[in-house]
Image (tube, rainbow, N blue to C red):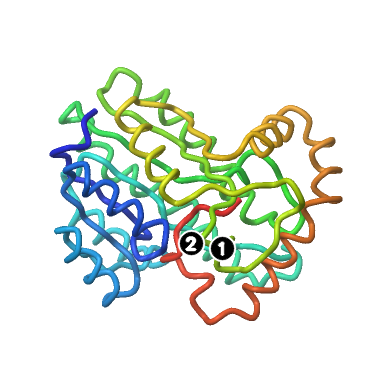
Amino acid sequence: MHVSGSTVLITGATGGLGRTLARAFASRGAELLLTGRRAEPLRKLADSVGGRAIVADLNDREDLARLAEEAAGVDILIANAAQSSSGPVLASPLADIDRSLEVNLRAPIALARMLGPGMVEARRGHIVLVGSLSGRTASPGAALYNATKFGLRGFAHALRQELHGSGVGVSIVQPGFVRDVGMFADSGATLPPGVRTVSPGQVAAATIRAVERDRGEVTIAPLELRLSGVIGGLFPGVAGAVQRRVGARTMREMAEARRSGDGEGSTADRGSGAD
């Protein structure tokens, strides 16, 4: 479907990747509804792209229902918001587990459920779920984040089958490590030698292509990470051994940054985009 002239809802809009997505869709002629928890930056962004701000906390189910009501009739949903969930799961407070599941997995599913029927009725629409390569390959120290992203990928593929022939497309967009903005960039973590990053602009451009070409799954990552994703899906034991050797330090650094962060590192406004 064409982005130009479509009404697009972007969650997690005040995060770095969310801002990039908003500007990319606005440049293609979309009318934007932007949502996030932080009112002031959200409204500034909405003003800059000619969109409308809807302040909402995806961890609050009443807020989520209100967001769906205010966004009724949108043509495209970009479920981008996510919470960082790095760290040993056995040491995670249950409240953190609940929030991660609520924001990263339930909220996108619920928004698809609440906004999807209007798209089906119009026989026109697209649902984009922003996942991660963490939805293909498990990493030590990322069990909870893996759980939400594996679940999001499975939901996306099943929903795409359910909506086949309805005029509504579904895509899972999976970035690798994103530089400059997002969870990985904010953590200051270092990557193993030879592992490269992608830019926020690459993720935004791939998201637009997913909508316009009705792509079911799009991975935005360098070759070495694409291969690790394939191996992780086919040979999880082999991938696990490699991750323990080369990936543990990165996840540990991200977990440490989250624990000692500035209070914003685990919010849903950060957006996805960290493997």
Looking at the image, is 176 positioned above or below residue 210? below
Q: Quadrant of residue 215?
A: top left
x, y percentage for residue 171? 41, 33
- Residue for point 42% across, 43% down: 129
Furthest residue toward top: 165
The secondary element bearing badge 2 is classed as: loop
> Along the horizontal axis of the image, is 210 left or right of 226?
left
x, y percentage for residue 39? 27, 75
Local crowd at mark 2 within 10 Å, few (<14), some, or many (≥20)? many
The amino acid type, in three-letter code, at marker 1 is Ala
Local crowd at mark 1 within 10 Å, few (<14), some, or many (≥20)? some
- Badges 2 and 1: C-beta atoms under 8 Å apart? yes
The residue beneath circle 1 is 185
> Along the horizontal axis of the image, is 264 left or right of 86?
left
| Rendered image: mark on residue 181 | 2
Viewer-proximal residue among 112 and 238: 238
- Residue for point 16% across, 48% down: 31
Looking at the image, is 62 positioned above or below residue 130? below
